[in-house]
Amino acid sequence: MINEKSKRYYYTLPISFFMITMFVFSVFIIGNHKNGSLAGVIENQNEKPVVNYRNIMSGEFQSSYNSWFNLNFPFRDKFVRLYNQIFYSIMAESGNKNLVIGKNYSIYEVEKIEKVLNPSNVEYGFDYYDNYAKNLKYIQDRFFDMGKVFFFIITPNKPEVMYEDIPLHRKLMEDVNHSEISAHKLLKESLEKYGVFFYDTTETMTKIKSDRQDIILYPNTGTHWTFLAAVYAVKDVFDSLYSKTGIALPQPNVKVEKLKDVFYGEDIDVYLLLNIFKGNKDKFYYKLDIDYDIDNGYVKDNAVIFGTSYSNMISYIFQRDMALFSKVTYIKYLSEIFDVSTDKKELLEILNNKIEEEYLISLINNNKYFFFEVQSTDLVPTHEQLVQQLCDIMRRDFSDKNVLNEIKRNNNIAKIDNSIDEFRISSENSNIKIDVKNKQMKVKSNSGKLNIQAKLTNNTKRLIKTNGKNIICAAYHIKEDGQYIEGRWSNLPDVINIGETVDFYYDIDIPKKVGEYEVLLSIVQEKVSWLEDVNKDYPIVFRLIVE
């Protein structure tokens, strides 16, 4: 009676012998082929490349052989697949030089492995990341001034998270260097230095890997995270967004179904690159149904994602099944623009590493949420290029949609008198102490409201209308524990004539909790346009100490 082990060899040995025979036979035919002697072969006078050590080590032989083979053999793909299948089945190796097979037949991209095993071999230095983060902070501040939301997302590298499945021979081949310098660390430290709002989803992957071994983070057949892992990452992104900005987005709910066959193409993206007849796949793949707990008060706005291929899944989670935003535009690398809706992802335009300025301006004007996403170990040049282009646009005058932007174009802002002497405290707050020099106020925690009087002078060449649509209001924000909390809005007079100076008031609710707060006084137009970017004395910022 044949035992299980013998049975396995009983079936596999004949197959392996047949495949080796076919491989040797095909090599024999190819090696002895004369031009014009094989039906269907395109006649070509190119000589077969010379095999020697120098040509092989330089890569010239591989390139020349590939060109020669393509020109001479129209049925090349069958031979290549057979060649790849033998390597895969017998030696668990990939015939694709850009891929390697790890434990459990998990497939990795060589380039990404090299970035993890040699973290100090960074493509760009400290100054590059420092300038990148500085530009991001500028964009973040400008968006905040305009009442928009900016958030930066770092996505994980598969070998970084699933390090243990990297094949041992790759670890031995690479000069493994656990230096403190890495692209991942440079990116995070630069973002933290300038106060850019961001979340590193590698933390999510590490947490799930430790606490939830039942969740597959990366399919063996794919280079990207699974959609279920991406959902958990989005949940943490929204938590981080709220903790750092006070902006609350509904959390995604998910129903999970496990399928034997692949449901999402991303789950087998690198498997398909193996170019084999049959290989090992995962035991199951996820299919998700996503919805959001959206109440009646939630307003759907437009959103933009500038990102890598990882953002494909993020945009899917935002919109598919139940849309979180009214519209999502996904810009991949600077190569493609997609419109993502509940039922499809439509390719709008193919880019050539360049995006038109007019299109960027329209995105700035017509979207509220801006998500930037990059991989932890790979800051591609097009991301830096896009950030620089946005900075250049936002430093200039870029919109003509409303009165405040017209004031900006004239470079003659409706100036607010922000001298501390103009702060007049209402009589009901007699226990308020004002430090004129340091712009600091001390109040008692039971003081109720703080009533501050300010003046606004219309130095423009037209009337400022503050009624009807897009009304101009006085607004304030209080910064508490790193979050900006929006306060109440106060209307200005209906019309401010040219040259007229008007008084208006900020009614500030004094926090009940004892502590120190940063208060920003500003003027906004329907949460769209803030004046701080043109009038550097504005908004008024002072420290509020609650005792």
Image (cartoon, rainbow, N blue to C red):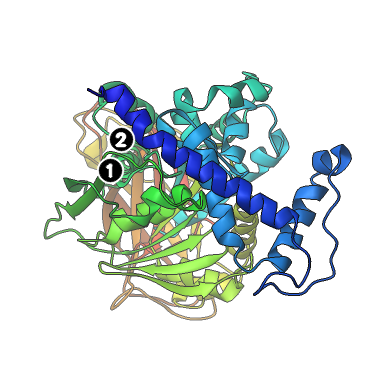
Extreme residue toward the left, this view: 296
Up the image or down, 188 lies above or below 461; here it is: above
Label 1: state its secondary structure. Answer: helix
* Residue occupied by mark 1: 228
Up the image or down, 134 lies above or below 178; here it is: below
Answer with left or right where residue 421 lies relative to residue 478: right
Give x and y (percent) for residue 275.
Answer: 51, 53
Residue 198 occupies quadrant: top left
Answer with left or right where residue 71 lies relative to residue 305: right
Query: 10 Å neighbourhood of mark 2: few (<14), some, or many (≥20)?
Result: some
The numbered mark at residue 216 is: 2
Answer with left or right where residue 31 lies relative to residue 398: right
- The quarter of the rendered structure image containing the C terminus is top left
Give x and y (percent) for residue 215.
Answer: 26, 33
Q: Residue at x 83, y 54 (%)?
A: 49
Extreme residue toward the bottom, this view: 462
Q: Are marks 2 and 1 in contact (CB under 8 Å)?
A: yes
Using the numbered discs, state the Cα–Cα distance from disc 2 to disc 1 in whole angstroms: 8 Å
Give x and y (percent) for residue 299.
Answer: 22, 62
Label 2: state its secondary structure. Answer: loop
The numbered mark at residue 470 is: none
Q: Residue at x 55, y 72 (%)?
A: 350
Q: Is residue 355 visible?
A: yes
Q: Residue at x 65, y 61 (%)?
A: 392
Residue 530 occupies quadrant: bottom left
Residue 241 occupies quadrant: top left
Amino acid under disc 2 = Ile
Give x and y (percent) for residue 405.
Answer: 50, 72
